[in-house]
Amino acid sequence: MKRATFASNIGIILATAGSAVGLGNIWRFPYMLGSNGGAAFLLVYIVCILIMGLPVMLSEFYIGRRSHSNVKGAFTKLAPGTKWNLFGFIGVSCAVMILGFYSVVAGWTLEYIMQAFTGSLAGKSAAEFTSEFDLFSTSLVRPLIWTVVFILLTHFITASGVQKGIERASKVMMPMLFIILIALCVRSVTLEGARSGLDFLFHPDFSKVTSSSFLSAMGQAFFSLSIGMGTMITYSSYFTSKTNLQNTALQVTIIDTIVAVLAGIMIFPAAFTFGIRPEAGPQLVFITLPNVFERLPLGNVWSCVFFILLALAALTSTISMHEVATAYMEEEHKMSRKKGAWIVTGICIVLGILSSLSMGLLSGYTIGGLNFFNLLDFVTAKILLPAGGMLICIFIGRFVKRKDLLEEMTNQGTVRFYLFSTFYFLVRYVAPIAIALIFLNELGLLKKFIG
Ligand code: TRP
């Protein structure tokens, strides 16, 4: 049987950018930035994107398109007879773990869409928004139902296939997302507190950067670009022989970074206008924006539109994680796409339920002070993704022949890659060393050695 590919170049960009742009940009980035001092974090983040993000994404594109396989099969093909295909195991586990906590937050967006739609957000004070959010997110049944609904939505898109499911959904949802985002930014910068919000976002205060901000920024970069565990390997395995890998990586990275900055532009002016602290943590966007919108004319409409934006962004990302595991099931365990997708969905539902319950009922069960939800977030974003990124760099920089790399990146010599040497240098030295240093720094070892 012929293996699936995406049908068009625009489909490739939208699906890949759809994977990258998600709750990571609109929910996670603003609160990470908020609790790590603002603009200075943005700078560290951008450096991480340039020296690690881009090279790792391009490396994943090489692995995916060269092999036309799922995460495990890719390494079996490119490095036969080695242990490299164990990477498939990291990739698939990471995919279901991220889906496990991500779909809880995605589920919250559905609840808020409904509340905005039925007008029940109207007329609440800032304190009420906070307490209602806490009440809802720690309750037993509703968040669970929404989590499961979101996983099922994801399921039906991926089960419908690469072109009919993923590509088609991305082509509809991504343009909607851009339009909504721009409208909301315009709304936000015309608020009273816009100046202090934008200052917070763009005027760095380096005294606020702590040593663990580096790990947070690196984790955020990997998370936001969907790299380090094979999502980009899986998607690029559906690219065509004509896809220009460098341009695609650059475009997707630029889109992802712009959306994160726009999300900041949308959220901080709103937060400052109504005196909500940027350090509010994971609930930041769930309390800030409805609180602001509900005070404006047509408040329900704005709130509703905002949560639709979050849901769309989340869905184009959850399908990419689901696809990593589904493609693996289908190809490595030789089952139908539908059956593979159901197994993945089943596992995700179990993890999703556990992480939703860990906000309330199971909040007493912690490991290292983290509940299940935070544990999944911490282990994936701050450990597995950067570690996976490092392995990818080692694979590309030490294992793959330079000639093969150049051949694939230039589509057999038909397009030019002016910055190839820069890319190669980043992958071989800069990115893996930077990742290692940040890990060591977090463990406190670096301080011991230096001083
Ligand atoms: N990048 C997405 C976001 O920002 C989430 C995501 C999709 C992801 N696929 C991934 C994160 C793979 C890590 C790894 O929301």
Image: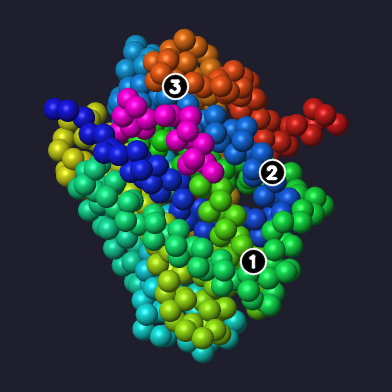
- Quarter of the figure with the N terminus: top left
Is 245 magenta? The answer is yes
For image coordinates 39% across by 56% down, the residue present is 175
For image coordinates 74% across by 44% down, the residue present is 211
Local crowd size for mark 3, using a 10 Å CA cut-off: few (<14), some (14–19), many (≥20): some
Instruction: Check disc 1 and give the amino acid type.
Output: Phe
Instruction: Check disc 3 and give the amino acid type.
Output: Val
Measured in 3D between alpha carbons, the distance from the residue under mark 3 to the one under mark 1, in whole angstroms, is 42 Å
Instruction: Check disc 2 and give the amino acid type.
Output: Val
Q: Which mark is residue 415?
A: 3
Q: CB under 8 Å between callouts 2 and 1?
A: no
Q: Residue 268 carries which label?
A: 1
Measured in 3D between alpha carbons, the distance from the residue under mark 2 to the one under mark 1, in whole angstroms, is 19 Å
Front residue of 171/375: it is: 171
Front residue of 380/162: it is: 162
Q: CB under 8 Å between callouts 3 and 1?
A: no
- The answer to whether 336 appears left or right of 6 in the picture is left
Measured in 3D between alpha carbons, the distance from the residue under mark 2 to the one under mark 3, in whole angstroms, is 32 Å
| Above or below for 410 versus 284 | above
- The answer to whether 447 appears left or right of 117 in the picture is right
For image coordinates 59% across by 71% down, the residue present is 188
- Span shown in magenta: 236-254
Question: Residue 166: x percent and y percent?
Answer: 28, 47
Can residue 44 be seen in the rendering of this structure? yes
Image-quadrant location for residue 201: bottom right
The kind of secondary structure element at disc 3 is: loop
Local crowd size for mark 1, using a 10 Å CA cut-off: few (<14), some (14–19), many (≥20): many
Q: Mark 2 points at which residue?
A: 44
Question: Residue 181: x percent and y percent?
Answer: 49, 63
